[in-house]
Amino acid sequence: MKKTILTGIRPTGRIHLGHYFGATKNWVELQNDYNSFFEIADVQALTDNFDNPTKVRENVREIAIDLLSIGINPEKSTIFIQSMIPEIAELTVYYSNLVTMSRLYRNPTIKTEIAQKKAIFGNNGESVTYGFVGYPVSQAADITAFKGELIPVGEDQLPLIEQCREIVRKFNSIYGETLKEPEAYLSKTTRIKGLDGNEKMGKSLGNAIYLRDNEEVITKKIMGAVTDPNKIKKDDPAEPSKCMVYYYHNLINSKEKDLICEECKKGLRGCVQCKKELIKNMLDFLSPIQEKAKYYEEHLDEVDNILIKGTKKAQEIAKETMKDVKKAIKIDYYN
């Protein structure tokens, strides 16, 4: 039997290169070797978009189109919508009894994100909601509802997986061996930098290239990308490691990347020329993805049917898990 992988993505916008190289490209490879469940985490997205539900709703289908376009195969994998699995919310309630607030606040991932919110809103974290702080509990419900064994994550998400493992161990110690304890499957790729040189490419940072950006948008974004600030004139030597244009040449494995690096260091390459070449290479790289996306954009019924079928499959598994959980905690009345 193949092991089960469970991972997800928040529908707060389309997929960009940071998502692709940091996570979803790896998912395409994993689906060949594992029983794969890919969750469109709309409930999680509402933890900090509760006042803009339209944004979340509109992006559910967009995320599905992006996943299908990069090669997620619905014959091999299950794509489902989180909010349509009520067992996840029910498990979250039961698990919340097993975790103290102090433990949640000590979670490094939560601490970092709360600090970011304080920096943005400047109100000592008063804007942080119960749902946001309790995210690790709901994530544990996501994972265990489908008997997830391996969870693809980056290093910054490891504390969340450890918290899930703690919840599983505590549940099993109280109620008997019921739940599977998952393991982290560490992503091979590090976080992808933004066009502005920021260590993170993010939707809210305005420094991302999206898989379905058109030529005009890609051209504008790349022409504004950060280069080595010490290169003033066209023939000044530069350091490619300080240049986001070279970073992206290298990221998409441009055929000329070694030559580009050499010419850049010797002052034989101007930034405008380099950016124009990156635009061409980026369009070539994204072309097959965008062709598939165009097909799905024109066949939305097919996308919806994939989501409906995947969600029904996920519902069946979650219901079986819930039967086991209710039996363990002795609330399986009249069954």
Image (cartoon, helix red, strand yellow):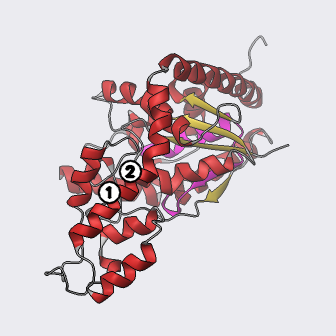
Q: Quadrant of the N terminus?
A: top right
| Residue at the extreme top | 334
Question: Residue at the location (59% across, 38% down)?
Answer: 38
Q: How many marks?
A: 2
**Residue lying furthest left in this view?**
232
Magenta-highlighted residues: 133-156
Corner quadrant of residue 315: top right
Looking at this view, is 314 or 297 the one in front? Answer: 297
- Image spot of residue 225 (x, y percent): 24, 63
For label 2, the SS is helix
Going by the numbered disc 2, the residue's amino acid type is: Leu
Q: Is residue 322 left or right of residue 12?
A: right
Q: Give the residue at mark 2.
A: 283
Residue 22 part of the magenta segment: no
Q: Which residue in the structure is indicated by mark 1?
A: 279
Q: Is residue 280 visible?
A: yes
Q: Are marks 2 and 1 in contact (CB under 8 Å)?
A: yes
